[in-house]
Image: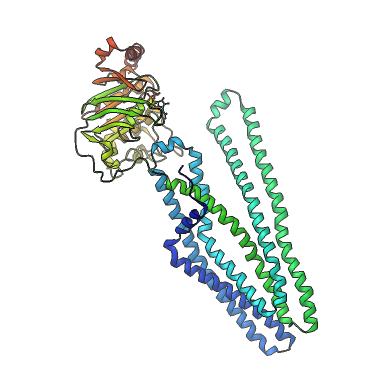
Amino acid sequence: MVETPRYRTTFVRLIGFLRPYKLSMGISIVLAVGSQAAGIAGTFLAGSVADALHHREHHLLPWLVAAILALGVVRAATMAGRRLIAGKQALAVELDMRTAVYAKLVRLSFGFYDRHQTGQLMSRATVDLQGVRFFLGYGLIFFFQHIFTIAGVALVVFFIDWKLALISIAISPALIAVAYRYSHVSHPLLRDVQQKMADVATVAEENIVGVHVVKSFAQEGAEQTKFEHRSEAVFGLSVKANRQRAFYVPMLSFLPLLAQAAILVVGGRMVAHGSLSVGSFVRFNLFLAMLVMPLRSLGMWIGQAQRATASGERIFQVIDEPEEISDTPGAHDLPAGSGRIAFESVTFGYDAARPVLHDIDLELEAGKVVALIGHTGAGKTSLASLIPRFYDVQHGSVSIDGVDVREVTLASLRREIGVIAQDPFLFSATVRENIAFGRPDATDEDVVRAAHLAQASEFIETLPEGYDTVIGERGITLSGGQRQRVAIARALVVDPRILILDDATASVDATTEAKIREGLREAMRDRTTIIIAHRLSTIALADEIVVLDDGRVVARGTQEDLAESNDVYREIHEHGMLERVFTEEVA
Ligand code: CTP
Ligand code: MG
């Protein structure tokens, strides 16, 4: 992650998310202040009722009650208005933040995702967003509302009697401090509880997903113990949090009582001596009650602001992360061409200090099929991922039809390259949507044609709802070979100039492999194709073979050339020969 920005900067930037909502913020604050003012006025009049009763001015009563009711209506109306406007604004700010985070997450490079844990990123996108959301949405409005209430009430009580006012105000620092303290100590604990709950969920999820492994190794007992341990951790922390609550909440209700007791004693004596009216005595008690909530909230608010800022920092770390791989200024679209690929003295490493590809010079002819072979870890996947610019080279260049891939727009580059990974990821969506993923405007015919080319149409038609069958988590589960063919169809539907198949048939049985191979034969027509393969039968599709060893090209040629000269190829040849006999028997 990038260097963390300073605390105050983060706070200012968070507030910056409110900029588009200045007007509605302003209106909300005015309405909030208005409803509190009506509340204060109403409370004041309640005291006047007591005075009227005391002086037997009964004719005033109906007027006073009517005024109190009217103020109540004003209060209710302004409150409703504030809730409507501020509520919508809070949701809009949340939407903006979420959009900003996700917009960044989808733009970040492969390298970023190599370096960071999924769980970490997910928590930034959810938990941290949650932490900021409420504060940004309502925090400032509440802040102004509380400050106004405290200031307004303080002013009125000082106006009534400054000595009594001092007594009631004296409690404020203690109340704010205790509320702040509560918020401060409870938060880390609550976050731990949440964290431990996530641990429990992880164990539960792993046991459900990995139930086959758990059962086949007879580890039910051990797994249950593990689960119980984690659950007990949640229990322990929750009990602790409960203890905190049991202490602080009564404490927060008790503190104002001290002030009230003082006012009852001192104020009561003043009423008895006639230096304070009964009405003012009543007012004091009511105003004191009005103060308690804002004072408590203000203390909590400070804690909340700190947490929101900490969460904001983590969110800004994602937002500020350089994209690494993005369109260079002045990038143009990849010009039309036939798909010739050239690597020129390419050196590349995921960590610049540890290159995994060394000084590679390789030219792949347009429209030809090249098989890339080599031992595991030789750098085959790495080499292929430089073409769509999943990573940038450290030295040298990769070009397509004579144009450096760094000079063209990523969108135009990737549109021309179909990549099929070993274990392709399919979305929890219909078969049709999965195939059309790279080209949402594809017609049904395009989808069916691509499926047909990939030899997938046959099995798709036998699915319960054909192309409309939902696959993935909430749908039907496809076999490895079926997924692969859907992925091939997905790559073909965009009609790319270049096709890259990474280990495409390593995980499937021989019959399926033969079917996929048939699909490929069609799919590769008129495209430059790179097949990273381990099976001889797949390699047989290639016009030429390139052997990679320890990040270097060690040989290239036709099958016949390599059969005589290259050890790696011979190894595969011996192993693959048996495969091929088997394949042909079955297919
Ligand atoms: N590597 C890495 N970071 C990654 C991917 C790979 O450091 N995100 C390293 C691997 O540890 C390996 C080297 O890069 O040492 C080459 O990896 P790769 O290109 O994936 O090797 P392949 O030839 O594709 O190996 P396989 O046949 O197992 O797929
Ligand atoms: Mg690989």
Q: How many marks?
A: 0
Its colouring scheme is rainbow
Residue at 46%, 49% in the rendered image: 316
Query: In the shown orientation, is residue 237 left or right of residue 474?
Result: right
Q: Quadrant of residue 296?
A: bottom right
Q: Is residue 278 visible?
A: yes
Q: Quadrant of ligand 1?
A: top left
Query: In the shown orientation, is residue 30 left or right of residue 399?
Result: right
Q: Quadrant of residue 115?
A: top left
Residue at 76%, 83% in the rendered image: 275
The image position of residue 320, as x and y in percent, is: 42, 47
Q: Is residue 92 visible?
A: no
- In the image, farthest residue toward the top: 564
Q: Quadrant of residue 172?
A: bottom right
Query: In the shown orientation, is residue 438 left or right of residue 48?
Result: left
Locate the C terminus and report the quarter of the image it occupies. top left
> Which of these two is toward me, 286 or 389?
389
Residue 445, placed above or below residue 263: above
Residue 164, placed above or below residue 173: below
The image position of residue 381, as x and y in percent, is: 36, 27
Residue 226, placed above or below residue 554: below
The image position of residue 556, as x and y in percent, is: 26, 18
The image position of residue 236, as x and y in percent, is: 69, 42
